[in-house]
């Protein structure tokens, strides 16, 4: 059978230069040059293979003037008057795959390049029926049992664009785009598709409560000051004893103080003693034998503070009278910080939930709410961090991610079920390493470990950000799939281009001119790197851009500012 049948109207030109992935096509006629558009698909014939074609993307169209030289009559000296002007028409093409007949005698598209075209090989534009044939081939190839229908190809909106769901999450993915480009829509659309699977397992880190309207998800919320003391199952208390040694130090120890080393030592010793006391009282001999400072064992912070206060005031026997102990007066600031944090209701989800989350078995029930899934219940979990104070937001998000990863790591291999972490607004807690404070450093280390090793244990990342230039390059470099929506900032564009193969730099030039909800999709999960128009989700997140001028043009009632002030004072919206 014949895969493509081209007429003269489809002819573009002949190959004049061949590289590993790039081809230059010489176009003889100006009317043929006008057929070429940046981002357009072309096919090139292969030598000695009637039904094998190379597929390429046009990334540059050039018309370069050529000045002709002539010699004056009767003289051997060359002169260079401008006698006339001609032009060299060139189209630069990036090769993206091969179309050939498969074993069942049907056409198949493959991203591999078995060979390159020969010099003077013919190049044709894919358009009309030939384009539909090729795009139909892509849709059929992508429509498998593990496919995710993300939208439709911009180049041919009759063709559905499928992503390979396995490859999208196996090798991490990033979703990047400026404010208002359609990121939240795209996240909601992916969650919508995943929610239809019988045992999907996605956990969304929602920093602004944008996804609280999605009905198909289980909603958890880190409680604010007004929620303290409540036992609502949707509240996610995160008791302080879940923090590891580094996170505890980042929260309480000021490294710039002269006595910081002694503070760390005394604080750790007191925490270890209290954790051991808990395990001893519960007769957890096996845990006690393998116990470390980082083990998530409940302990009373009040007892730790009391021990530090004792050492801070301790007097020891001297030669003639009592003298100051070895740590006398060195822990005053540490004790002040501890008491200040514990009494601050903004941090109540850490310190005031001991009665609810203090028992030894509380962690397993919390993990089940975070990581559990069932056929009859929601399989998408959305954690609302909007009421977490900004100064400790990175360490709290990192704490949740670390617990999920570690529980997955210690789960028996045959019982391990894959899950994905959707990191919305990632630039707020996954920043670049330069100039990080200890709190940000702890969060970043947790996520970088997941990015490097998570896929081996069934933990994947979907990194979502409007400022990719501010996100850790280590984490972004581990994302083998990139969904890039409109980006207008030059630094953000440069970051995304750096993540892409050099051969696709022409495609990247369209980043600032993409329409809302339109994305460049590149990576292992997509057959063809190209522009895709994302399907809007059935349930919209609460992130729609407000139409200022339109709203100002309407009659409107005054807000209840007194109620707003009260909400601010109590740190909670009614």
Image (cartoon, helix red, strand yellow):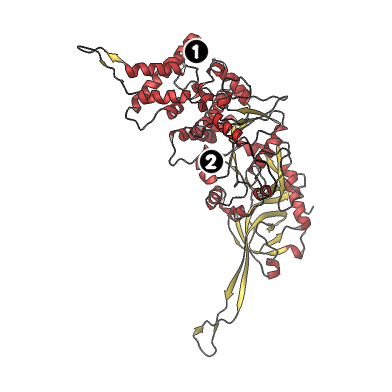
Mark drawn on residue 25: none
Left or right, residue 291 beside residue 318: right
Tell me which corner region of the image, top left, top right, bottom left or bottom right, holds residue 5: bottom right
**Residue 206 seen in the figure:** no
**Residue 230 seen in the figure:** yes
Label located before the other in sequence (1 or 2): 1
In the rendered image, residue 491, in percent from the top left (x then y), is placed at: 52, 51
In the rendered image, residue 480, in percent from the top left (x then y), is placed at: 58, 42
Is label 1 in a helix, a strand or a loop?
helix
Tell me which corner region of the image, top left, top right, bottom left or bottom right, holds residue 269: top left
Tell me the quarter of the image containing the C terminus: top right
Q: Nearer the viewer, residue 336 or 252?
A: 336
Vertical relation: 339 (above or below) 287: below
For disc 1, the marked residue is: 286
For disc 2, the marked residue is: 427
Looking at the image, which residue is at 56% across and 15% down? Answer: 361
């Amino acid at each position: 059978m014949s895969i493509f049948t081209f007429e003269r109207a489809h002819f573009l030109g002949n190959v004049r230069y061949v590289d590993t992935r790039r081809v230059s096509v010489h176009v003889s006629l100006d009317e043929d040059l006008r057929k070429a558009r940046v981002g357009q698909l072309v096919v090139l014939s292969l030598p000695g293979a009637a039904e094998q074609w190379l597929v390429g993307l046009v990334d540059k169209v050039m018309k370069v003037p050529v000045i002709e030289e002539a010699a004056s009559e009767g003289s051997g000296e060359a002169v260079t008057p401008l006698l006339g002007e001609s032009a060299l028409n060139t189209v630069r093409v990036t090769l993206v795959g091969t179309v050939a007949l498969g074993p069942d005698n049907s056409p198949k598209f493959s991203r591999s390049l078995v060979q390159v075209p020969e010099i003077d090989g013919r190049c044709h534009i894919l358009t009309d029926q030939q384009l539909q044939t090729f795009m139909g081939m892509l849709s059929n190839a992508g429509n498998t049992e593990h496919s995710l229908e993300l939208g439709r190809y911009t180049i041919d909106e009759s063709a559905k664009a499928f992503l390979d769901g396995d490859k999208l999450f196996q090798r991490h993915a990033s979703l990047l785009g400026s404010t208002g480009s359609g990121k939240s829509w795209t996240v909601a659309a992916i969650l919508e598709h995943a929610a239809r699977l019988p045992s999907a397992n996605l956990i969304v880190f929602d920093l602004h409560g944008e996804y609280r309207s999605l009905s198909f998800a289980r909603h958890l919320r880190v409680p604010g000051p007004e929620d303290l003391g409540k036992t609502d199952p949707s509240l996610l208390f995160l008791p302080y004893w879940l923090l590891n040694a580094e996170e505890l130090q980042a929260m309480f120890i000021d490294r710039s103080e002269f006595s910081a080393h002694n503070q760390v030592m005394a604080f750790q010793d007191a925490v270890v003693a209290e954790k051991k006391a808990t395990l001893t009282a519960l007769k957890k001999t096996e845990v006690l034998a393998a116990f470390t400072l980082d083990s998530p064992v409940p302990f009373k912070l009040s007892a730790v503070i009391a021990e530090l206060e004792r050492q801070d005031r301790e007097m020891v026997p001297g030669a003639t009278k009592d003298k100051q102990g070895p740590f006398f007066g060195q822990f005053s600031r540490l004790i002040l910080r501890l008491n200040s944090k514990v009494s601050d209701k903004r941090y109540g989800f850490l310190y005031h939930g001991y009665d609810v989350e203090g028992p030894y078995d509380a962690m397993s029930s919390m993990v089940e709410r975070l990581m559990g899934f069932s056929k009859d219940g929601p399989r998408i979990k959305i954690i609302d961090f909007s009421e977490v104070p900004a100064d400790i937001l990175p360490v709290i998000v990192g704490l949740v991610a670390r617990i999920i990863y570690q529980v997955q790591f210690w789960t028996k291999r045959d019982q391990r079920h894959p899950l994905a972490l959707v990191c919305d607004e990632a630039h707020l807690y996954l920043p670049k390493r330069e100039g990080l404070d200890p709190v940000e450093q702890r969060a970043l280390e947790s996520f970088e470990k997941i990015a490097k090793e998570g896929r081996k244990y069934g933990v994947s990342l979907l990194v979502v950000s409007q400022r990719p230039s501010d996100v850790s390059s280590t984490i972004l470099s581990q994302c083998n799939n990139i969904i890039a929506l409109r980006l207008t900032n030059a630094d953000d564009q440069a970051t995304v281009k750096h993540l892409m193969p050099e051969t696709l730099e022409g495609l990247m030039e369209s980043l600032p001119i993409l329409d809302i909800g339109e994305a460049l999709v590149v990576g292992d999960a997509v057959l063809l790197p190209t522009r895709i128009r994302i399907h809007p989700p059935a349930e919209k997140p609460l992130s729609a851009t407000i139409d200022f001028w339109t709203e100002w043009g309407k009659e409107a009632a005054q807000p209840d500012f007194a109620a707003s002030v009260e909400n601010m004072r109590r740190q909670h919206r009614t």
